[in-house]
Image: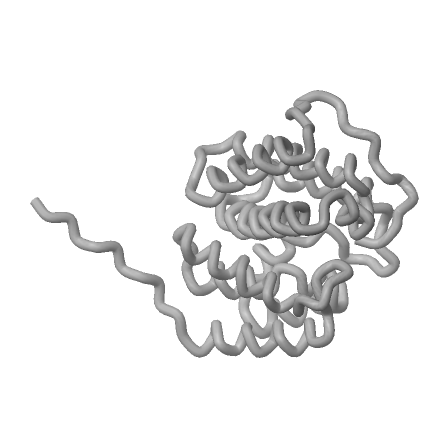
Amino acid sequence: MKRSAPKPPHLGPRLQKAFRYAAEKHAGQTRKQTAVPYLSHLMAVTSLVLEGGGDEEMAIAALLHDVVEDCGGAPRLREVQKMFGTRVAKIVEGCTDSFSDPKLPWVVRKEEYLKRLKHEDSETRLVSASDKLHNVRTVITDYRQYGESIWKRFSGGREGTLWYYRALNDEFQRRKPNRITRELALAVAELQKMTGRTPRRKGRADKDRDGRGR
């Protein structure tokens, strides 16, 4: 018996509204110490979420996953809920590691986020994993081009950044694997190989504790 093809999710005016909202709120922002518009990251994460089986509301959350952290904190989250609904706001909240300005020290935020991630639902975890996958792939590409100099961009430096992606990957692999978490595992393994680091599941690397930036 021939299997019927899965139906694609409905993508309509709400997604277009979210794209315009994200473009407006992140206007002028770029990827760390580059000229690449930050919107490119949001578009890439949204693409991964849709490829991973997400629906329109999850795609909207992917477009908005950094708008609270980078564009206004808790008041922005309330605005997202009002404009796009509770489900989108819940996912965005679950992807946010800082609601305050100034932000808490980098290592504190990352450790707290890892604790919270353990309890997030599958939708939030898919959007989060898509975010981390695109980030790791970008690090790999930049590392090939620029080498060790890229670590100057990151608040956690070389060791903290590598520790964080290993820890994230460990957490995502704790549950049933999916398209995105499998790709994340491959990407983290490639980054470890490139940088000459092997996985460490216990303890943590020396991390930057001075609280600089994101």
Position of 180 compared to 136: left or right? left
Tell me what residue is drawn at x 73 percent, y 70 percent. 29
The x and y percentages for residue 100 are 82, 58
Tell me what residue is drawn at x 71 percent, y 50 percent. 146
Which quarter of the figure has residue 23?
bottom right
Foreground: 197 or 178? 197
Outermost residue, top side: 202
Look at the image and tell me whether residue 74 can be seen. no
Task: Note whether 63 is above or below 119 in the view shown.
Answer: below
Number of numbered discs on residues: 0
* Quadrant (top left, top right, bottom left, bottom right) of the N terminus: top left
Colouring style: one colour
Tell me what residue is drawn at x 81 percent, y 42 percent. 157
Task: Note whether 60 is above or below 106 in the view shown.
Answer: below
Outermost residue, right side: 210
The x and y percentages for residue 159 are 78, 35
Foreground: 9 or 33? 33
Outermost residue, left side: 1
The x and y percentages for residue 191 are 62, 37
Look at the image and tell me whether residue 60 can be seen. yes
The x and y percentages for residue 6 are 25, 55
Tell me what residue is drawn at x 41 percent, y 60 percent. 55
Task: Note whether 88 is above or below 107 in the view shown.
Answer: below
